[in-house]
Amino acid sequence: MSRIDGRTPNQLRPVTIERGWSKHAEGSVLVSFGDTKVLCTASVTEGVPRWRKGSGEGWVTAEYAMLPRATNTRGDRESVKGRIGGRTHEISRLIGRSLRAVIDYKALGENTIVLDCDVLQADGGTRTAAITGAYIALADAVAWAQGKKIVKPGRKPLTGTVAAVSVGIVAGVPLLDLRYEEDVRADTDMNVVCTGDGRFVEVQGTAEAEPFARAELDSLLDLAQTGCAELAGLQREALGIALER
Amino acid sequence: MSRIDGRTPNQLRPVTIERGWSKHAEGSVLVSFGDTKVLCTASVTEGVPRWRKGSGEGWVTAEYAMLPRATNTRGDRESVKGRIGGRTHEISRLIGRSLRAVIDYKALGENTIVLDCDVLQADGGTRTAAITGAYIALADAVAWAQGKKIVKPGRKPLTGTVAAVSVGIVAGVPLLDLRYEEDVRADTDMNVVCTGDGRFVEVQGTAEAEPFARAELDSLLDLAQTGCAELAGLQREALGIALER
Amino acid sequence: MSRIDGRTPNQLRPVTIERGWSKHAEGSVLVSFGDTKVLCTASVTEGVPRWRKGSGEGWVTAEYAMLPRATNTRGDRESVKGRIGGRTHEISRLIGRSLRAVIDYKALGENTIVLDCDVLQADGGTRTAAITGAYIALADAVAWAQGKKIVKPGRKPLTGTVAAVSVGIVAGVPLLDLRYEEDVRADTDMNVVCTGDGRFVEVQGTAEAEPFARAELDSLLDLAQTGCAELAGLQREALGIALER
Amino acid sequence: MSRIDGRTPNQLRPVTIERGWSKHAEGSVLVSFGDTKVLCTASVTEGVPRWRKGSGEGWVTAEYAMLPRATNTRGDRESVKGRIGGRTHEISRLIGRSLRAVIDYKALGENTIVLDCDVLQADGGTRTAAITGAYIALADAVAWAQGKKIVKPGRKPLTGTVAAVSVGIVAGVPLLDLRYEEDVRADTDMNVVCTGDGRFVEVQGTAEAEPFARAELDSLLDLAQTGCAELAGLQREALGIALER
Amino acid sequence: MSRIDGRTPNQLRPVTIERGWSKHAEGSVLVSFGDTKVLCTASVTEGVPRWRKGSGEGWVTAEYAMLPRATNTRGDRESVKGRIGGRTHEISRLIGRSLRAVIDYKALGENTIVLDCDVLQADGGTRTAAITGAYIALADAVAWAQGKKIVKPGRKPLTGTVAAVSVGIVAGVPLLDLRYEEDVRADTDMNVVCTGDGRFVEVQGTAEAEPFARAELDSLLDLAQTGCAELAGLQREALGIALER
Amino acid sequence: MSRIDGRTPNQLRPVTIERGWSKHAEGSVLVSFGDTKVLCTASVTEGVPRWRKGSGEGWVTAEYAMLPRATNTRGDRESVKGRIGGRTHEISRLIGRSLRAVIDYKALGENTIVLDCDVLQADGGTRTAAITGAYIALADAVAWAQGKKIVKPGRKPLTGTVAAVSVGIVAGVPLLDLRYEEDVRADTDMNVVCTGDGRFVEVQGTAEAEPFARAELDSLLDLAQTGCAELAGLQREALGIALER
């Protein structure tokens, strides 16, 4: 069986990570997983939300959104509707938790970093591209804060790297990094977030049509771990290149 | 190591399923997992949402909410705040997907069933209790619709049973069906939804503190499958008792 | 003429008052007036709203809501609609005023008690059941606050008891404590809130069809005073029983 | 005891009713009860809300609001806050019910009349001035609809007149038509809506400080009936003068 | 060509300015431009919004709204819709900017003046009438604040006068101060705000049908300057008359 | 005097127009005016809003928004705040009016085109860049609709071209196409929208500090006409290049 774009089942789409995309943000990345393009910016502010004041600890949070015509048919703006939908809430929370998994709050000190992940074009895997790109923006923002001494000298707020990928079973075959057309046809759909050392931060699997057996679940987890490891390599490579701005 | 309430690591809390709790709803259950109490009602209406009209297929959806003082400290009402929070959205969507996994839309015909899961008292595991109880309310509502010929004779809208349980790793030990105090202390927290035949509908695992290794994930999945199987037995037992109203 | 449930015109429905229903709230009551069931919880917090700070006086407020399927046909959730309806607002305000009528703010000190009245099942008289039950929850919360020394020793924040009942004229006959089916057929509908010593806190009478004459109003007030006196007796009885939790 | 403005306890403030205030509305009145000034407009539209279509019956509804600086200190606009407060909801509903009490829906036919009551200046009794003025605007709108044959010839949608007044007990003395300063000092505050034939449409009495005894309630009802009768006379007089526009 | 109301192209409608309309507000004006009537109130409060605290400077802001039946057909209330429309936002901002153009923030000191402009009846030019009237209310409020020593002695917060007028091209002819029927037929519509010394504060021109040439723009600006100068004269006259309240 | 980026007073920033940026939208452009970058997409749908049905005429509308970190400091998302701000409303309306000025609704037929203008990076002139870029996206969408026969053969919905530029007076000198730092220092700020034939669609001038004299206004209009003419040339050039996607 060959995939619509000719990939093998365990092959990622071409991934690009464009650092320093924005002149304003402390960290910014335009990440693409094939035709999925997400602009991730990291904004550093001194101070923390009220409930965390005086703790000596920092905070990291994320907001995800799609431009109205990121998709094949135009969606109404949530700002116009006056309320955020369940899917947006869910993904924003997922991204926030994923990035907090590699943050040492004490080392960050009472500073806040907000990750904004705005999908400019969608073709499946927007949340996994967002997490993978936001990590780079976060790393750049942390480096910026260290350079500005907002983070105290010697402190290392980042405890590791984090990346994410989608996997799914389409026509009985487990596939890595689904495009939109594959996602629609998947019986099971799973998003997996891993740290660079191969451990899990989030596992979210859903039976879209038929419930799935333990053996299927195991094969999807295997595939996701491979994909996340490959993405972690690309992240290391991207961060190795000096950022010019 | 013994748990705060003396349970063994793989032991559920006492589960009660009180069918026919409400005189108005087509199906209603007051379910308890220990001190967690959720009132689940199923409302049948003829017709489907606009986007599904003319398809010949039905629809099942769910809404989850907590009473303000279901928890240890009072939470503001979402109706007063004028917006639904991310957590509420996320759980409502999870319950809906879980129940739709055992529905044959064609057999249901163009009818809608809404499951309302209102947490009257919370002590951990509110979403898993909600799914487990809502299944019973759904089964009763389907039976009611069959009795009223709203569902056509011979059609079987329910394709199986579904139940859910939480698992987590506390102080290095995988535990089944966490109470609130255990949940707070868990390094990893996972909610698993299974059908009565032991397959998975949803797997949602989150690293609360440290990322978790594949072996830990595997042990949690084992534990959850056992717990769901036991809940499926309790569901069968509850439905075996004739409902008097 | 006999009523649908065989009661005489001046007879209350069976009333049950289940104290200590919730393990979390400082006061909690599941009250029923026939098939109307309302869960009332009282939450004590130290401190008062901003506009009252430094006054040395406390505050008591109430919020009323219905579960979506408390009624015969499912109502949309106000949290989902994003706004609270006029009826909800009106009843919440009525309950708050009714309970504040028996509170000595000075004796309460700068503490706040919030009464949440959630209708689990509705069959007419939900607001009057809510007031009658919330009084018990309030009394228990005040006792708790006295026990915790949050209320200063020797202070008595409660100055009396308060209960409420509905009355109405159906087919020319004044009836006490209307069920939903009676309420729908009533020409005049009145809710009356009285203190235990027989004085009035609130009188809200509405002509549903025909305007009503002074004589009719007088007979309704007579009936309501009798009903409230009987409810006050039941409240005293309920509070006489030691609360076990 | 003399009142702040020299009135006797059972004396109304000067009442003015200026018909035909607006060039656009089908009925419009600028009503004043002393310094309280309310602009009441009646808007006729053919057709009824969806839930009433095909019934052959009309509908009458009302909306009440205050300009931000109608009061002594400026209030925030409800449009800016994005939600209508409980007090506004409550009064809008009261006005609507009061006017519907004198409407024959069948005679009105499938037409809707909306009464807008906007308080331009407030000095107590805004809701009672609104009802009293809105009745005149309603009567003019009905006459307009009869003239345009929107109401069928020979049909009389108005079955009577309706007016409202506030009463209260201040320093032990029952007073008619309270100004703001009296209202603030009142122990008991009651709004009463009567038809022109002296029957009651609404009775809403509230103990502001002390609960009130039956004898006090009776004296307030006496006073209110007198006041409403006087207002009914002023309404008849206002409608007797031909409307020039 | 003669205009619907017999005016010459460069003639204003009759303008009335009724100062001291409200007994509560520090400044208040009922302004009319023909049948357009706007109630403008100015509310003075000590203190400034948070972002301006400690600056030693004051703030002036404005809110514009229409009563639902100010227009020929009833509009829904923005408070009921739960959101403010774009047009309302736009005009409120325009009025605020226009008045701030003649304010010396330092001389005002840390005080805030809010201008509320509520359209009671609309017949074109509501925003220009609002600005012209609000200026008078502002001047009265400033005088009040000077009298109360809220503004320091010797300080002059007002640096000039400001007025506004609409102009437009109807059937090829530039017209001053459009009525609603003219506005609807205009190819080009412009609102111009000028200070009393003939300079511009705001110029907002819009091609309603055909784009307009520079020569047309120039003729409209000429007309607007004439109109504003005439309004400035009426404002001076109105302020010359001692305010009796 | 030299400008911060070395431009002459009447020089535009470098303008880039990248057509066909999105694979989903019927027309899409990434436009930049210096560091200001706006993604403009045009979405074609058959049918028109309800109020226009049966007219035989089409509709064009626009929505403008900024990504949270498009600016130097992060702004809160309007979707999270639950309401759209006045500035957003105002600019969305301006863009819509500007593009409708070159649309022949009859020729478009009952089709709707929505222009989404999302600012990815802001450095002054976001609304003028948005209009200039949206015109190209609109032209591409119209061509697409003609190709698909959604627009009837022979019909030409576009009647001309439209572009926009900002002008302002900084330190006494009229400048074309202000960057953010210039905009902040401007005494007068004007946005001008012109058609390709040099006529005006919108003129919006605001005195930020001092009111401006007629002579200043005239010089700004001259400058803006020059700038718009140059942009019209760039638009023609961009559309001359065949679109590859």
Image (cartoon, coloured by chain):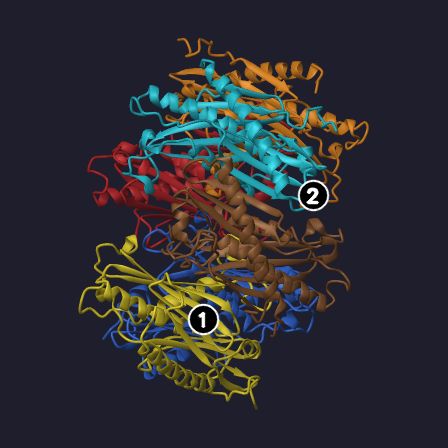
Chain colours: A cyan, B brown, C yellow, D blue, E red, F orange
The residue at the far right in this view is F153
Q: B232 and F231: which one is in front?
A: B232
Quadrant assignment, res B22: bottom right
Residue C52 placement (x, y as % from top left): 26, 56
* Amino acid under disc 2: Arg
Residue tagged by mark 1?
A: C127
Q: Nearer the viewer, mark 2 or mark 1?
A: 1
Quarter containing the N terminus of chain F: top left
Task: Tell me, yes or no, whether dots 2 and 1 are on the same chain.
Answer: no
Whether residue E175 is visible to the viewer of this picture, yes or no, is: no
The quarter of the picture where residue F234 lies is top right
Q: Is residue C229 above or below residue A181?
A: below
- Looking at the image, residue F231 sits to the left or right of residue D207; the answer is right
From the top left corner, tell me how far across and down residue B73 is, in percent: 36, 55
Q: Residue furthest bottom?
A: C1
Q: Which residue is mark 2?
A: F52
What's the residue at 52%, 37% (across, down)?
F89
Work out which quarter of the rendered image holds the C terminus of chain F and state it.
top right
Q: Looking at the picture, how far across and down is residue B49, in whole percent?
A: 67, 53
Q: Amino acid at mark 1?
A: Arg
x 43%, y 85%: residue: C223
Classed neighbour count for the residue bearing mark 1: other residues with Cα under 10 Å, few (<14), some (14–19), many (≥20): many
Chain letter of the residue carrying label 1: C
Q: Residue C116, image x and y in percent?
A: 40, 63
Asked if disc 2 and disc 1 are in contact, CB closer than 8 Å, the reply is no
Observer-nearest residue: F96 or B167?
B167
Work out whether D67 lies above or below D219. above
Looking at the picture, does residue A243 appear above or below residue D192? Answer: above
Judge from the rendering whether residue A144 lies leftward or rightward of residue E128; answer left or right.
left
Q: Secondary structure at mark 1?
A: helix
Q: How many marks?
A: 2
